[in-house]
Image (cartoon, grey):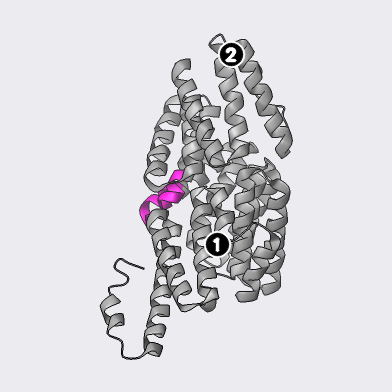
Amino acid sequence: MGGPIFGSRGGLDDAGSLDHEIGDLERVARVNLHRSYARSMTGHHQQGLVDADRAHGIGQQLGRRPLTAEANLAKAQHFAFAGQPAQVGLSLDGTSRSSAMRWGATG
Amino acid sequence: MGRNGMMGHRAVWAYSYLAIANGLMGNFDAAMEAAGDGTVLARERGRVLDQVHARWASALVQLYAENFEAAEDDARNAADLAEAHEFAWISTMIGIAQGNALSRLGGLDEGITLLEESASVGESTGMPVAVAWAKVYLSEIMTACGQNENARTLAQKSLMLSRKHGFKAVQVMSLQMLGRAQHRLKESKGFFEEAFGLSVEHSLRPRGAQIKAELGWIVSEMGGRGHGRELVSEANVMRKEIGIPVFGLPDV
């Protein structure tokens, strides 16, 4: 993951139980997602993509597909707003209708 | 996010981004299908923010496909809904699409007002993405009106923002507007060449076809009539492939 995330990495490392740590990690991922979405709305895409990548990394670490999927959507939002269309399809794991429908299934 | 209703349903937003991306690339059938699916799903789900989002995406696709009446219709519907529910951020972005569509339909004053308002709100609320898009569309209007100095100032601002924040489509358009607004053909050619190269790099085909035609016109003016004609002809092939009418391109 790397880098300062919400200033809470140390707290996470000190967590007493695995369950507690998983819960905190998911919360950290969600904070990163919120921040990523907010940054896409103002146009700060470079930092916003870093936030989304962090959330994606945590999602992978925890094996939580909805989290990684939402991180991918955040990335797609950045690329759509930045006018980098080819990256949108890649972020959404393909440009087919079934890709969007999968979002419906996980949403 | 999706869970608390603040950000809308994921599938609708994914459809919107697929629509916008395909529109920017000139895959209009896929873009309109995605926009349509998003609109239907948003209506089924009944969440207003999603409906606004889907209609905004549809307006953008229609703009890229040069269907300006449909774009204005979608943008107006989205704007009405967004205003009624005080969705401030997306209202600003919709204003840009609507202003652009209106100006293309002959409503210059109303279009310019909307674009200037969007740029102003974007500046006061820290939304460089809104400022950049609004200013580059204003620059395009100024070039059409022959106000090259205004066009240059606006395009330089949007170019600066696009380079700083990585807004590639705005960067391409800003370079194109700078190309249009130069007095010297050689300088215009340089801007068009850079704009076209970037458009290819980022698969922005509709805009790229337009730039290529304009480059052809400049090359022809500079004495390379044969090469200029070739470039315009290639641009027309690109436009035919993506389904945009070829008439209206600069004659060589």
Q: Residues within 10 Å of mark 1 (few under 14, many from 20)?
A: few
Q: Residue at coordinates 50% horizontally, 44% vertically from top-left?
A: B115
Quadrant occupied by the N terminus of chain A: bottom left
- What's the residue at 54%, 75% (across, down)? A66
Q: Residue at x 50, y 31 (%)?
A: B176
Neighbourhood count class around disc 2 (C-alpha, 10 Å): few under 14, some 14–19, many 20 upward:
many
- The chain under label 2 reads B
Q: Is residue A19 above or below residue B209?
A: below
Compared across the picture, whether A61 is left or right of B16 comes to left
Relative horizontal placement of residue B100, taking residue A39 as reference (left or right) = right
Q: Type of residue at label 2? A: Ser
Q: Please name the amino acid that badge 1 sits on.
A: Glu
What main secondary structure does the magenta stretch of the protein show?
A: helix
The location of residue B228, given as percent across then percent down, is 61, 16
- Could you tell me residue B82's position as x and y percent? 56, 62
The quadrant in which residue B144 appears is: top right
Q: Is any part of residue B87 visible from this angle?
A: no
Give the labeled residue for mark 1: B83
For marks 1 and 2 on the same chain, the one whose residue lies earlier in the sequence: 1
Secondary structure under tag 2 reads helix
- Chain of the residue under label 1: B
Residue B124 at what x, y percent from top left? 36, 53
Magenta residues span B119-132
Measure the C-alpha gap from mark 1 to mark 2. 48 Å
Image coordinates for residue B49, horizontal then vertical, percent: 58, 67
Q: Is residue B145 magenta?
A: no
B11 up-or-down from B4: above or below: above
* Between marks 1 and 2 in the image, the one whose residue lies nearer the viewer: 2
Q: Would residue B24 be seen by someone viewing this image from the given angle? A: yes
Residue named by callout 2? B220
Residue B71 placement, left or right of B86: right
Of the pair B206 and B100, the residue shown nearer to us? B206
